[in-house]
Each structure stands twice: as structure tokens, then as C-alpha cells.
Amino acid sequence: MELKQITENTYYIPGPTNLGLFVLDREVILIDSGNDESAGRKVYRLLEEKGWRLRKIINTHSNADHIGGNAYLQKKTDCDILATTLEAVYITEPYLEPFLLWGAFPFKALRNKFLQAQPSKVTHLINTEGIIEDTPLEAYPLEGHFLQMIGVKTPDGVFFIADSLFSSDIINKYSLTVKSNIEKALETYSFLEKCSAQFFVPAHAQPTTDIGDLIRVNKEQIEKINKKIMHYCTIPSSRERILQLLVMDYKLQLSSVQYVLTHITVSAHLSYLSDRQMIKPLFEEGKMLWISTG
Ligand SMILES: [Zn+2]
């Protein structure tokens, strides 16, 4: 685990999920805690080596790859954990993530560390917007990916933008990156287009001074998927059928985990298109089908 300095007080740790650190007087505010307990251990060791003390973890959202180190770090340091109201519920009761994705109590293959982290205790609820209490950091709402995700900006101009934007490599590999609300995701892109910061640190892409290209790639992918779904729905198609067509179209590998992650994104697109009266549901032979209205 490697610590990279961005500005005087702000660092990040590159990894499958990039983590942020704001350090003042040897006291650390950590932005997200990594994939699992092993990530938590590595962060702990790194802070020990530096002689820094962990005071707070701010979780941008509750997905397992962002809160996986919470439990270990909280046990070792008794640090505060801060999150927005809805995300806090999922951090405290992490089985709710696979529960939400599957739509009921999840079967065993979904109850693993990729979807379900160890529980930890959120000590402070924070607003989605404004200065985060007792810190010099500022929260911004970045909805669209999960429930109530935030970005965190440091006073020295580094903006940790969580899972609002994915790298082109990830988009090329998975095609459908997790979205729970397409309208909000598009609003988030518009907000980020106008946003200024010295550095942007997405959780799953290289830090950059300019996110213009990244926004374009992410936005185009949403538009492409909307178009594909509209095309499939010229014939009445079930959600399962639409998912199947996308999986075959993009030649994706499915597993139980990948299936539920694809499923939520397909559902988000269906809600978006339906609310714009571009498709509508119909019920036939015990199936819910979607048909384009055009
Ligand atoms: Zn993530």
C-alpha cells in the first residue's frame, strides 16, 4: 500500500478503491476505508509507520469496497465514522446491500465481502452538502450511483468524487457500471462539469486535474444503454430479457454478484425511460413487459 501526496495536507492511497487522507497536525481524516479487513490492516500499518493518528473515517457511500476497512480500523483506533443518513443505515447493517440488490434476503453467494462488509458503527450523521461538522472538509451530493453518495472536497482543492465517474477501462470491461438513478447520475455529471478543483480523485479511476473526458465517456455510456433498451423495447420485452440482451450485446460474464449489479442498473434505466414516457409496462401471460411508446 502506497501513500501518494497530492497537496500539502492531502494524500491518496491508490488501489482497487482509491482512498483519501486529509492530514493536519498528524491527525488523519480518511475518506473511505477500502475493500475489506486486509485493506483496513494495511491502512492502520501505514498510519503507524507515519506516526499519524486516525480520527475520522468519512464514508462517501456504503458499498462494501468503500467501507470494508471500517470495522478493523474502528476496533483498533476507536475513530469516528461519518456518513449520510441513508448510507449510514447500510454501514450499520451491511446485509442490506445484497438485500437491496436481490430484492429479498440474499442467498449465500451474495452474502460475501464483495457485497456485504463487516458492520461498523456510524458515530455521526452528516448532511449531503456543506462543511462536514468538526472538519475543514466539504461535502457535495453526488447521487445516481447508490443511495445518498457524497463527494468530499478538501480546503486545499482536492475533490474526492467517489463512484460518480468510472474509468474508460472499467466502462469497457463492465459496460454497465452500477447506477441506481439515471436522472440523478446525469445531474451529477452536469454538476461536475461546472465544478472546479485542483485535483479530482475518483475512487475507480486515475486522479486527474481535468475530468472533462471522463464525464463525456460516462455520459455517453448512459445514452448508449438508453438507446439499446429503446431498441429492444420495440418488441415487448421483460426486464430479464433486456438484461440478457445487454449481457450478450456487451459479451459480459455473469455470476450471482455480477447479475445483481447489472440488474440494478437495468432497473434504473427502465425507471428513467418510463418516467419520460418513452416506454411503458404491459402485463401478458404472467410477465411484466416493456414496450416503447414511439
Ligand atoms: Zn466503489
Image (tube, helix red, strand yellow):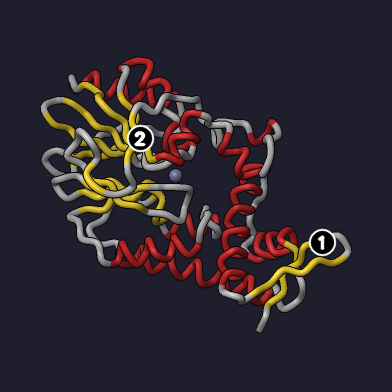
Where residue 215 sits, quadrant-wise, is: bottom left
Q: Position of residue 162 (x, y in %)?
A: 37, 48
Q: Nearer the viewer, residue 76 or 120?
A: 120
User: Mark 1: few, some, or many residues within 10 Å (few <14, many ≥20)?
Assistant: few
Residue occupying image coordinates x 17% and y 50%: 157
Respond yes or no on whether mark 2 lies under 8 Å from ligand 1: no
Please tell me whether residue 286 is drawn above or below residue 51 in the rendered image: below
> Can you identify the residue that label 2 sits on?
125
Please tell me whether residue 194 is drawn above or below residue 181 in the rendered image: below
The quarter of the picture where the C terminus appears is bottom right
Residue occupying image coordinates x 69% and y 31%: 108
Where residue 107 sits, quadrant-wise, is: top right
Respond yes or no on whether mark 1 lies under 8 Å from ligand 1: no
Q: Quadrant of ligand 1?
A: top left
Answer left or right for 82 relative to 155: right
User: Mark 2: few, some, or many residues within 10 Å (few <14, many ≥20)?
Assistant: some
**Which mark identifies residue 287?**
1
Kindly give the residue lying farthest to the top in the view shown. 76
Give the residue type at disc 1: Lys
Task: Find numbered disc 2 in the image and state the secondary structure of the residue it sits on.
Answer: strand
- One can see residue 206 in this view: no
Please tell me whether residue 205 is drawn above or below residue 4 in the rendered image: below
Give the residue type at disc 2: Leu
Who comes first in sequence, dot 1 or dot 2? 2
Answer left or right for 204 relative to 140: right
Residue occupying image coordinates x 48% and y 59%: 171
The reply to whether the C-beta atoms of the residues labelled 1 and 2 are less than 8 Å apart is no
Q: Position of residue 131 (x, y in %)?
A: 22, 44
The quarter of the picture where the N terminus appears is top left
